[in-house]
Amino acid sequence: MKPMTRTLALWATLAAGLVFAQASMARELPDFTELVEEAAPGVVNISTTRMTEDRGIPFGAFGGQDVPEIFRHFFGDRIPMPPGGGGHTEERQSLGSGFVIDADGYIMTNAHVVAGADEIMVRLNDRRDLKAELVGADEKTDVAVLKVDADDLPTLQLGDSDGLKVGEWVAAIGSPFGFDHSVTAGIISAINRTLPRDAYVPFIQTDVAINPGNSGGPLFNLDGEVIGINSQIFTRSGGFMGLSFAIPINVAMDVANQLRDTGHVSRGWLGVMIQPVSRDLAESFGMDQPEGALIADVDPDGPAARDGIQAGDIILEVNGERVESSDKLPRLIGRVSPDSDVEMKLLRNGEEQTITVTVSDWPEDLAGNSNGSSGSGDSPTRLGVAVQALSDSEAAQMGVDTGVRIVDIDPRGLAAAAGMRPGDVLVSIDHQSVESARQLSSLVSDLPTDRAVPVRLYRDGRSLFIALRLGSDSE
């Protein structure tokens, strides 16, 4: 074979291999065209109008006269009007997404999309604009249900969000920046994600491009089933940065069904304050590894106190389901119907116990022996703190029977290293109640030096635990 012929044959072989590789990759990548064709009719655009009163007058209303900079420093570009002094009403609009869950006109979206709205309009896929009524909204899960006067609407097929796996392909349809029925795709990058102020939602984290206007829209799996509601993004710029969060559809539908049936959501309530179990705390409680939810404080009027839960208990299981971390406990209890019994396995004083608690309904108004001496007591120098006893009224206000207040602390001492602060109230050390400054000194002198011990504090209106470790040479 001639050299030129061999070269052409080689290039032909390489080209054929490249085409084959591209064809193989194309077969492996998902095709969302059929999904979009079937699902798009059930996705809607939501616009809201809210009337707000603007009680300021623009500086330009004064005929362009020069206004001293001091006024702009305090008031910006508008001078506020005093009460009864006039002002005018402004119309503010916002956009979001939603999807049909019932052919009779029920639509699901985010609670924050319709919060404070005076008027809600829904635009269907066929371009009809319908006025919507708010059936109900639940801020804790960010789920809202709307109703429009229509029937035979196209509905979406709902999936099962409990079986999701990281790495699955997913797609979103919504109205980012008002562009109706925009489609973006990606994968699930994490599940059971807990976000600040959202204790009841185990979020689905994805890398699907979500932007303002996508909120309330559906998240689909490859079967075209809705497995979540797009709710939040993590951003430092105001736009998509690769982290999006969706409410699992199983959680959302439980809320939606309650909103449709009763107009509000009932969820179980224990009446406890919890905190994570760190590695040092786990050691101090005699655990092999950090897990569970540590009870930092107990509402004396709540169901947990009534049925025997104590501060210092570590909840390990609820109805047989393991509590791997503290953020899982609110979700497990929240989905329990009020007045139902839950069986809880817990660790108390190094031993596992099982306690049955009858949970109550979440209270509507819930957002979230001293000797009387007021002088300083003995200074437990081993800790590096100076303390004073609590008065009876202080103890009653905090809901504690014993404790001493830290009035001074050595910034280089063991207490400071463990995280104690001036103003903290020491309630117990190594499960022993602190009744006085003198008794605290005795407790500290008997503490072990080969392991961390739990310390219960009262700080800024709440109870918490920290781990304290004494060095063998600490004196």
Image: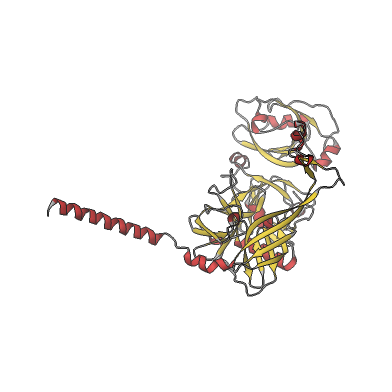
Residue 316, how many percent across, how many down? 62, 51
Which of 391/471 is in front? Answer: 391
Answer above or below: position of 252 versus 455: below
Which of 230/389 is in front? Answer: 230
Q: Report whether 51 appears left or right of 35.
A: right
Q: Report whether 163 appears left or right of 424.
A: left
Residue 135, how many percent across, how many down? 72, 65
Answer above or below: position of 380 versus 170: above
Displayed quadrant of residue 424: top right
Identify which residue is drawn at 48% across, 55% down. Answer: 167
Identify which residue is drawn at 71% across, 56% down. Answer: 115
Residue 381, how many percent across, how many down? 70, 25
Q: Quadrant of the N terminus?
A: bottom left
Which of 84/144 is in front? Answer: 84
Is residue 41 among the parts visible in the rendering?
A: yes
Is residue 353 among the parts visible in the rendering?
A: no
Residue 475, how many percent across, how many down? 65, 24
